[in-house]
Amino acid sequence: MPDEMSPQAARKLRAQLMNAPVAPGALSSAINVGTERMLDVLEQQYFTQELADGISSFKYLEGDYGTGKTQFIQCLAERAHRNDVVTAIVTIGQQCPFSSPLAIFRNVAASFVARTFGDDLGSQPKGVEVLLRSWIHDRLRSMGVTPGNVVPDAVRLQIERTFTAPWFGAADTQMASGLRALGGRLLELECGAESTVLDDELTAWVRGDTLRSPNLRANGLHEPASDATAFQRLKTLIGFLRERLSLKGFFVAFDEGTRTMSFRRGTVKQRQAIENMLTMINHNAEGEFGGVMFIYAATPDFRADVIQNTYIALRDRIGSVAFLPGRPMTPLIKLDEVNTDATLRELGDRLLQVFAVADAISWQHERQRANMLVLIDAQKQVLGFPTTVPPRFFVFHWCRLLAEQADRQFSLSPDDAFVFVEQNRLPDSEEQ
């Protein structure tokens, strides 16, 4: 809650929202409203037990532009970390087109965040090598060795067994060898070995880079990842982390934002993206990704215009009945239904608290709540929202209005609000 934040955290949150009215990373939960009950149920259903039992799930998160898809994902990621569930949040776009299995694998492998949740998720080191190093540090501490100090041979040998023991039945034997080699090498570095070019090569190869070298061949790694092997390698990666390192579960989110329609309808790339989604859903349902919650976020037009009449198999797997707290197994989660004027007013009150803590302001609450209502009405008129305003637009204008009142509070008339919204528009890149 904002009133429990330090002034420093409040100022950081305020600055983030003033710079860009998007989900503020690890601070997202401080201003989250409207979806708490859904988040509670997902946490209880999956993060506390089912993922640890190897049960997997797929959720399709749907919401129009600015309705809080990324915010929802960030808040769910925080709850995952609270329950020792590893997260990977991938933004779908030019760097990760969903039409490429290899791009999906690479971005997931590079996006893993260790279970310790810091103040700023965006600044934390990410990648599969971070998980391996974090696990090694945990094991050293559990055996009485502080990372960085001398590691006794008996301790090294005990941890080393995790990486030297053969692994039978891996979905991709090359990936299994690469993970064992990388884990063993990271342990050697913790035990005082000198860094070599092999370290970077192993990390890049395991992350899916197209890399060949004599050092890698000496470790039995002959074939870099490709579109043909990417999903098998992702399964092997998840399996290794779960079985060898005993990680509890995984939350993997793909956030398309407004990029859902980036492929022309009916093109080869669009069909491949749909096939990749089906592959992940089907293999997850069959238990091949043990203990993973996949979530895919997109705008409503993707399901309505693209999936509904063209990709029947995917339509059937997503369904049309939306998630409710009483039916947590339902794949479809619709955010548009929880975004109401009442939700915006609650969000506005949260932001009032943030600004109050940031600068020790005593707000005139009746005046500010009246300003809030006038502003929402003006946004509907100027921006053309017939029912309710998407949270991103509301946050953008409300934060600017509060910033203008830091020294002197005033009442906003309907005409003033109309002009204010007209003169303070989101940048074009934010409105698309």
Image (spheres, rainbow, N blue to C red):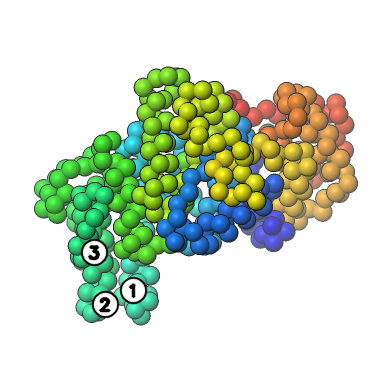
2 or 3: mark nearer the eye = 3
Which of marks 1 and 2 precedes in the sequence?
Answer: 1
Q: Is residue 369 visible?
A: yes
Q: Which mark is residue 163?
A: 3
1 or 3: mark nearer the eye = 3
User: In the rendered view of the protein, which quadrant contains the N terminus?
Assistant: bottom right
Instruction: Tell me the distance, in whole angstroms, between the alpha carbons under discs 2 and 1.
Output: 8 Å
Numbered disc 3: secondary structure: helix
Instruction: Tell me the distance, in whole angstroms, between the alpha carbons under discs 1 and 3.
Output: 15 Å
Q: Which mark is residue 155?
A: 2
- Write down the residue under mark 1: 140
Is mark 2 in CB contact (under 8 Å) with mark 1? yes
Residue type marked 3 = Phe
Instruction: Tell me the distance, in whole angstroms, between the alpha carbons under discs 2 and 3.
Output: 14 Å
Query: Could you say which is closer to the camera, residue 90 or residue 60?
Result: 60
Numbered disc 2: secondary structure: helix
Q: Which mark is residue 392?
A: none
Which of marks 3 and 1 precedes in the sequence?
Answer: 1
Residue type marked 2 = Val
Residue 227 position within the rendered picture, expressed as x and y whole percent measured from the top left: 28, 35
